[in-house]
Image (cartoon, helix red, strand yellow):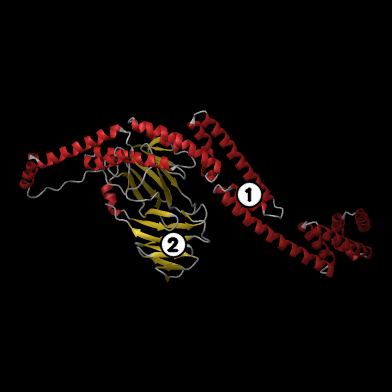
Amino acid sequence: MLILRLKQCECCLSDGRLDEAFELARQGDFRAHRRGQRLVGRLVPALIARGCKHLAAGQLSQASADCEKAAYLAGNQAEIAQLRIAVARAMQSLEKVRAANGQAIAAARRHADLGHLTVGQQILDAVNAPDARVDGLKHDLAARRAAVESSCRKSSAALADGDWHAAIDHLVPLGRGAIQDGAVRQLCGQISDRAVEEIDAAIQSGRLDVAASLLRTVERLPVHSVECQARAKGMEDFRAAHAAIEAGRPHEAEPILRRLQRLLPRADWLTEAAQEARKMSEGQSALRSGPLSLAAAAARLQITTPPPIPTPPPLPGHFNQAAHNGDQKSFCLHVDGIGSFEVFTSSTISIGPISSSRSVDLPLMLDAAVPAIRISRSDEDYFLQASRPVLINDSPATSRLLHNGDRIGLGSRCRITFRRPSAASTSALLDLSGVRVPGSSIRQVVLLDRELIIGPGAAAHIRCDEMAAPVTLQKRGEGILCRSAAQIAIDGNPAGQAADVPMNANVSVGSLRFVIVREQRS
């Protein structure tokens, strides 16, 4: 059998089938034979020569395999060692190139996600080394650009036909990633101008319901114009005035209506509404200062010790908000260059209109008729409860287990998006749109469980892509502990990599600057 394998190895060498020859020559009895040793002496240089060819062609894995086969048969000879060193250096160079390409790809993807398709394309064009990842991202950017151009053509055609609603439908799929495209911004401006004309006409005729519906349609645009934002603010003022009148506070509604009257001089009905609010306010003042006020004073004199008022049990489908407010704790986190965030540290919060008969933890500028909701955390799950049905993902419900991305509708405009950015953290976010917190610019609410992450990437609760490493805020007793891999400074004084954050203190970690302020809710 050995003689047969020796002859087979000779045939393989003659035909250039080196891998088959190696499999025959690697057996111990083969190399013990003198004829086998001569064949090994021919096979090793052939493997080294083929490995050099693979190295020159950039086929590093094949070159490394030939080098190891030659070393197995002949040991660490000088030629084999040189080939091994050359392959290792080539692999190091290839890794450096791949790392540089990876950085370029990441930068191009970030710009593309922000809508800067041209900048992303320029970054990829500057990559000289061939890389399948670069080619794939180039195809993706080309597809995105084609989608933007197609949507712009269809939207322009619909706008030319006078159907700006259809024009919006063509632009909506582009999302916020196309807001930097010049054609998209121009189209959004033209559509907004058409919409503002119809919105103003609806307001002037007193059809505020129609104006609100048109505003909801325009809000779907990727780019919002200043004029549309001003109309949306005006609709919030209309709702605030109506809520004040419904709550019996016409003196609060009158200045709002007067201000709107100056902004909308063609809306004649506003003049009448402001006058009626003034009459209502004067009537209330006259009643309160007339003889009826003396009856109330006499009743107070007769009552020496007011009897205690028992607290009724909570009604089915309602929650005891008064008891809950006593345990509620929150603070406001102001992050430079990013925004302000209301942070709740309790496991349950209530949200509702500021003019609601029930006190809520997070008051919003909503109609008084909008029901309040409660969001509570149990273990790692969040549950929503409401006294009356509210829209959750456009379906009415009074209770629901919340999932990442669920949309909660309160009233006609307010939308609250529930998010769980990090799978490793049970803290959650509430994104507010179509509504505002009184006296505040807050648009996001943090439901803090154990920690709050500020850092780069979509997994952070507060995203800051300029940071090199994340910063974590953790609950510790009644205070907040800040942890970071970088040095922390509080009011300019070094505090190490973990420090308790005092209220109203300026905290800096690298490029991050923030301050925590304790909010007092009534």
- Indicate left or right for 127 with 215 as reference: right
- Indicate left or right for 475 with 355 as reference: right
Task: Using the image as rendered, state which of residue 386 and residue 265 is in the foreground.
Answer: 265
Q: Is residue 26 above or below residue 258?
A: below
Q: Residue at x 84, y 67 (%)?
A: 79
- Indicate left or right for 84 with 312 as reference: right
- Mark 1 = which residue? 121
Q: Residue at x 52, y 61 (%)?
A: 469
Task: Using the image as rendered, state which of residue 142 and residue 46 is in the foreground.
Answer: 142
Q: Which amino acid does the dot numbered 1 rest on?
A: Gln
Q: Residues within 10 Å of mark 1 (few under 14, many from 20)?
A: some
Give percent across and percent down for residue 12: 90, 54
Give percent across and percent down for residue 353: 31, 43
- Indicate left or right for 127 with 295 as reference: right
Give percent across and percent down for residue 194: 45, 34
Between disc 1 and disc 2, whose residue precedes? 1
Q: Which mark is residue 155?
A: none
Residue 394 visible in image: no
Q: Nearer the viewer, mark 1 or mark 2?
A: 1
Give percent across and percent down for residue 243: 27, 39
Q: Secondary structure at mark 2?
A: strand
Q: Quadrant of residue 177?
A: top right
Q: Residue at x 25, y 40 (%)?
A: 253
Q: Quadrant of residue 59?
A: bottom right
Q: Quadrant of residue 174?
A: top right
Q: Are marks 1 and 2 in contact (CB under 8 Å)?
A: no
Residue 288 visible in image: yes
Image quadrant holding the N terminus, namely bottom right
Question: What distance separates the C-alpha of mark 1 from that of mark 2?
Answer: 33 Å
Q: Residue at x 57, y 48 (%)?
A: 116
Q: Which mark is residue 513?
A: 2
